[in-house]
Every structure is written in structure tokens, then in C-alpha cells.
Amino acid sequence: MTDLSKIKSPADIKKMTVDELGELCGDLRKALLTKLAAHGGHVGPNLGFLEATVALHYVFDAPKDKLVFDVSHQTYVHKMLTGRMEAFTDPAHYDDVTGFTCPRESEYDLFEIGHTSTGVSLATGLAKARDLAGGTENVVAVVGDGSLSGGEAFEGLDFGSTLGSNFIVVVNDNDMSIAENHGGLYADLRLLRNTNGEGQPNYFRSLGYAYRFVKYGNDIRSLVKAFEEVKDSKVPVVVHVVTQKGMGYRAAEADREHFHYTGPFDLSSGDPLHISTKPTWTELFYSTMAPMMEADKRVTVITAGTPAAIGFDRERRLKAGKQFVDVGIAEQQAVALASGMAKGGARPVFGVISSFLQRAYDQMSQDVAINNTPVVIDIAATGINSMTDTTHLGWFDIVLVSNIPGWVFLAPTCKEEYQAMLRWAVKQTSHPVAVRQPSGPVWESGREFRSDYSKLNHAETVRHGSEVAIIAAGSMMQNALQAAEILRSNGRQVTVINPVFLSGIDTEKLNNLKANHRAVITLEDGVLDGGYGEKVARYYGDSNMKVVCRGVRKEFLDKYDPAELLKECRMTPELIAEDAEALMK
């Protein structure tokens, strides 16, 4: 049994024999599973690429040799071997490291990467810089087969083959993305897997790469041999490694989609430790879309490789049939596809995580807005109460979407309003519409909402008062109403307004406030710079109305505490009430 505590750097495993490496892999897998079961995380990707990671560090000489991991959600073992073992063996230190490569943690981590299909391109830059400086180090890019469906992965591969120097691409082929793979490329990968890498056509050879196939990508001896053969290569080369996602853990091998990423689970059975019966926004999206899809065969839901994020598990995807489209990890294709479908009379709805939508900014502008195609985008995982990884922050979408001409951007405050907005967005054919799905617990207001949002930029006054108005966008409405209750108990009555639209302001309502209000507070769980609050402040700029804008600073945070961030932004009910009271005085 290997004493993992003695592994401080890759130098410590270079002393081992290949047989000892096999034993090391078993011990690393046990430690990894122990942490993942207790803590949660990316299970399948890390178990599947475990042996390949050990072999990479055994053969190559990082950090002199450069290792770039695409997405980097498969780098737990890389971290274990590069001085961060304690974060995987000691529960007291489980949160010492992030779930992705992080240069702040280690010189072995070259980039902060959490979005897919970027690693090859980044590695080509390292290789080009090395060539310009006359260096000789190896540059290795690790990319999964699922990531190959992203356009940037092709662009990186296409350019990398022209370098004419050492550039090694390790393709981790486990025949899976997060869910199953989609796209014509995968027929070629399947052919290569079934012919021991000898089938034609060969995608990688057609781009100009030398090619090396490893049939057993979880066999340490085969991997070491393959990497030794390509080390110090003088030409660009692809090492095509066939791995088993979830390798060594039966539950993860059997349900690869579920165990791509999961919360804590029972190690003996694989069952989740915490099962919530509370409704989720993900389920609400599905339950709202399913009847519309049933009633109108033109209604089609699109995903860019993240079906679980919008509530479509395998059974639901099969039931939807042609009305569910997974384009692979290709947000640009998803938006352009939706535009073409809308032009052709279909009713496409693209469900996408907020931090991934920014990858398709050009398509939202050029392919949709300029052409005014009635595309619908449901933006999930938004705001402060969403994912907290620096690469997955959900607070940039307000700035992104609201400032593209032509887009109607709706911000529902509760379950009932979310459903009403989504239904209207799908039925109307006059505008491209984005709906900002709230995050956190699903709030049921018990109210009825309008079914027609065609009168654009028409806000709703939720509570009438005087002196101070609180304009609360989307999920901030709950905090605004609670603040109003605090103030009411102190004998103060403030106005609370739901802006409804983030893509424009209700100038009539803002003008009317001037009659008996001296100040306005805006609340949004998005970035302040270029956000909704600034639109209100700009409108009041030449008046006596004082405007206080509350939101998130323009910065990248990592593993923040949502409750603490709300306090810092002064958007808790108590602090909102405190600010309103001060403005009244």
C-alpha cells in the first residue's frame, strides 16, 4: 500500500516501477472515492482519467513540460500528485482546493479553466511562445471526446497541426460528454475505437497530426509506453486514449451521466445522501415546457450538452424525440440553429446555463437580434444563489443580454411569473426573448400574472408607498418585500416595483415616482456595471431623484458564501430597509 502522504510532487512517483504505479493508482482511486462520497464533485471524469494522469506525470516533466487540461474537471488526481494530496485525504482540508485547475494554488496549474473546448487553443499558444523563444519543453493538451464538439476545439486542433513542432494532444475518449455524445464526428471516433485506430477516415490524421492509438486507456503500462513514444516529438501528434468513465466504481460505470458530477453519496450503493423533495427551477422548466411540446410539435427544446441542467433526463429526452435537440457542447451552434428554426416556423427554446451563454454572444447579436428571429432562451443558474466557481458565475447575463438591441429580457420574480413569461415567450413571434430563470429555492407567490408581455418595458407596482421606491429585479423581489414589511412595522410605507423587463425601463412609471418620491433603490443579483440599475440612474440623471444601485461588483469571486455576498452588496432585507430608512431621513 502506497503512503500517499509522502507524494509531494511528480518526482516522487518517477522513482516507482510500472508495477508500483499500478498499486499507486488503486490507492489513489480509494482516496478519491472516499472524498467524493463525502464531499461530492466530478466523479466519472476523474476516475476515468486517473491512470492517464499518473502516466502523464510519470513520463513528462511538469512544470517544465506544460500540461493543459481542457475543462479541467478531471484534474483531481493531477492535484493529488502536485503537492495537494492533503486536500483529498484529510476531511479537514477537503475545501482547500477548487474543482478546476487554479494557478493561484500551484505552478503546475497553468490556467483557470472551467469551460470546455478551450484547452487545445490555450496549449497552441504555449507551443507558439516556446517556439518563438527557442524552447524545447513538451506541450501537452488533454481534451475529452465530448469537448471536441465545441467549435474552439476544432479551431485549436486545426491550428495546432500547422505548428510543425512538438505539440501533443491527448484525446480522452470515453464515448461520453456529460450525457451521450452528439455530432457526426463521433462516428469517426467509434470507427477508430472498433478498429484499433486503423479505420479510415481518421479525423486527426486528416488535420495533419501523427497518430497513436491506446485501446486500453486505463492500463498504466500501455499509457506509459504510448507517452514515452511521443515525448519530445518533433511534430504535432494525437494520442487517442480510450478510457472508461467512472472506472473502478461500479455505480459510476453503470450510470455515467448521473456520476459525471454529483453531491455526496453512499459509497457502498451509490445512492445520494441528501434527497430533496422541494421543487426546483430545473424541474419547473421541464414541467412548463412538456405540455407545450405535447400540444405543438413545432416547440423544440435545445441544449448544448447539458440536458440535466434543464430537467431532461434520458427518459424525458427519448419521450420528446425530435422535439429535443442536443447539439453537443456548442453554444454558438445552438443559438444559430434556433435562429434558423425560428425563421422556418419552428418554436425553439434554448435552455442554457448563464455562464455558458456568454460563449454565444456574437450569435445572439448577429444571427438572432439583427434578423429579429423569435428565438427563446431560458437562462438557468443565474445570480448570487447559483454556482460559486469562478468559471461558472451567474451574474454577467444581465449586462450581456439586456444591452443587445432587439432582445426582450424578462426577469420573473416567482414560480407563477416564470411560467407565465415562458409560455408567452414560446407563443409570441415578434421578438427574440430571454427569460432569466431565478436560482435558489422556488418561491410561490400565490398570485396570478399577466399572460401577455407584448407591451414592452411595462413594469408592475407591487406595493404603493411614498418617499422611497425599491425596484427589485427577478429573485431580489423577495428581499424587497421583506424589507418593505420591516419598514411597515416601523410606520414607513415604501413603493416596491417589479421591473419585469431588464432590456428597457418604464419611463412613465419612473416619471410618476417624481411626484412623491425622493429616492429609488435598485436591486439586481447581477453585475452593477452596465446592469439594470445603471439604466434607471441614467434616466434620472438630470433630475433631483437620488438613485442607489445595489448589485455585484465587477469581479471574479471563487467559492464565495452567497449569504455573505448578499450582505456585502447590502441586498439582505434588513440592509435594504436600513438604506431606505436613511434615505427617508
Image (cartoon, rainbow, N blue to C red):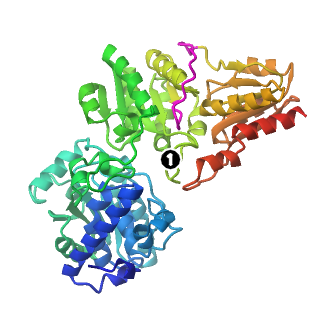
- Left or right relative to 335: residue 484: right
Q: Which residue lies furthest to the bottom in this view?
A: 15
Can you give x and y, in whole percent of width and height, for residue 205 in the image? Answer: 20, 59
With respect to residue 11, does 90 lie above or below?
A: above
Which portion, as a residue range, is magenta? 436-454
Q: Does the magenta stretch include residue 438?
A: yes
Residue assigned mark 1 = 387
With respect to residue 518, does 454 lie above or below?
A: above
Kindly identify the amino acid type of the residue bearing the numbered disc 1: Met
With respect to residue 305, does 284 lie above or below?
A: above
Label 1 SS: loop
- Left or right relative to 244: residue 482: right
| Dominant secondary structure (helix, strand or loop) of the stretch shown in magenta | loop
- Kindly tell me whether residue 420 is visible in this rendering: yes
Q: Which residue sits at x=17%, y=64%?
A: 213
Along the viewing direction, whichever of 491 and 140 lies nearer the viewer: 491
Q: Which residue sits at x=44%, y=15%?
A: 427
